[in-house]
Image (cartoon, grey):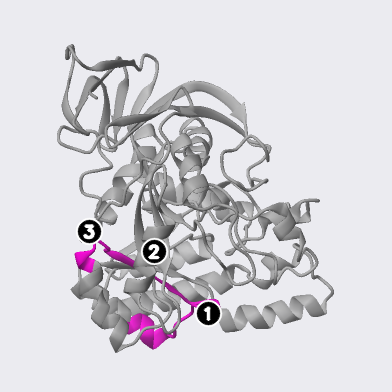
Amino acid sequence: MDFLIQNGVVVNAEGSARTDVLVQNGRIAAMGEGLACVNAVRINAEGCFLLPGFIDTHTHFDLDTGSARTADDFVTGGRAAVLGGTTAVLDFATQERGGTLVQAFDTWQEKARGCSCNYGFHMAIAEWNDKTAAELPEMTRRGVTSYKLYMVYDALRVDDGAIYAALKAAKNEGALIGVHCENWDVLNRRIQEVKARGLTGPAGHPLSRPAPVEAEAVARLMRIAELAGSPVYVVHLSTAEGLAEARRARARGQEVYLETCPQYLLLTDACYAAEDGVKFVMSPPLRKDSDCEALWEALAAGEIDCIGTDHCSFTMAQKLQYGNDFQRIPNGGAGVQHRGQLLYTYGVCKGRITPEQMVQLLSAGPARLFGLTDRGTIAPGMAADLVVWDPAYEGRISDTNTAHNADNSPFAGLSVRGCARDVLLNGERIVENGVLVLPGRGKYVARKGYGKCR
């Protein structure tokens, strides 16, 4: 089916213009004023923006932590994603210790069946050795051009030497490595110190992982990447101090990319004192107002490259099961549905960023950085992943008015403006007037080598 989207304002990272867009055979066929196509279904975007589909660089669907399984799988998480305007997610296919990357890739392909948005995978490496290194060319052949390493968690963390070796190997494949930056040994000591003070509930969580725990790890990663001569990507940056370490590396001439999340722009550690404080337990933890402000300023200055969500949802029952032991509360929260609304409301509408910068952070930047070469921009020949964004919408997020499968949202109570009225995925209109009418249409998107953005 062909579509002719008329009367909307097309917003790309490079600029905006009022123009019509013709979609044929899953791609953007033409753009201009007064386009005509006899057989096309017309979509009136009067008063709306037409945006490239959003790309979430950081989701955890169908994740088993060992003590809990996430509330959302690819079916429910993908549903929430597209209803918020996200047409592609990059999830983490996680290698098991003793297992292979190929096994992880195949497992996550099976998990992703029935997803309503497109998807790709960062391969999360839990064990770096010659066998894992030898698998990288096969991952490249399968369209994987990014990896993740953890400095934390006993089942996942790798040592600094492994990070160094992996960075070098990934560079040879034209791939990018993202790293979860926290000092594991120090934060474990601090957990015991905090508990010894009698602070065992959610309020103890941010005290056990203060800003220097992240900043030290970012600084260490920067020096490891410098020695490896490799680009590097910091996932879910949460602190002004971590940002300062990345700036120092860039000043030395290093190629450094940064991701943050809406929770680190909008929420603070005061949330842990709330009655439902368990739902805010995530890692890194929520920070201070000054950290939020520093990250907003970095967004406006173009210093942050992507906004992911780190969507890793759990029910309140799962959270409350360990409510008196912050160390055991399942880490994570829901966010994939509301990322666009939150950035539009508290960024664009408040004058902190422009609509073009919003597109850069949610669409164009992620597409280029992670090798989604035919997405992220509205232009002839590009894949027709498109969002008709209605700026007139006003609403409020609650724990219950969401499409994800968790019964809570860390953003409950926040007012939002704008919504994804209609969404086209691979040239099909899958969301119409805010309703998912064609579920399960997502597909795996093979990617090319990462695109240098700095």
Q: Which mark is residue 452?
A: 3
Magenta-colored span: 140-165
Q: Which residue is mark 1?
A: 155
Q: Which residue is mark 2?
A: 247
The image shows residue 307 at horizontal and vertical percentages of 43, 50
Residue type at numbered disc 2: Arg
Labels 1 and 2: the sequence-earlier one = 1
Labels 1 and 3: the sequence-earlier one = 1
Mark 3–mark 2 contact, CB under 8 Å? Answer: no
Query: The C terminus is located in which quarter?
Result: bottom left
Query: The N terminus is located in which quarter?
Result: top left
Q: Is residue 157 magenta?
A: yes
Q: Is residue 2 magenta?
A: no
Mark 1–mark 2 contact, CB under 8 Å? Answer: no
Q: Which mark is residue 142?
A: none
Along the line of sight, which residue is nearer the eye, 332 or 346? 332
Along the line of sight, which residue is nearer the eye, 453 or 440? 440
- Left or right position of 404 against 108: right
Along the line of sight, which residue is nearer the eye, 63 or 306? 63
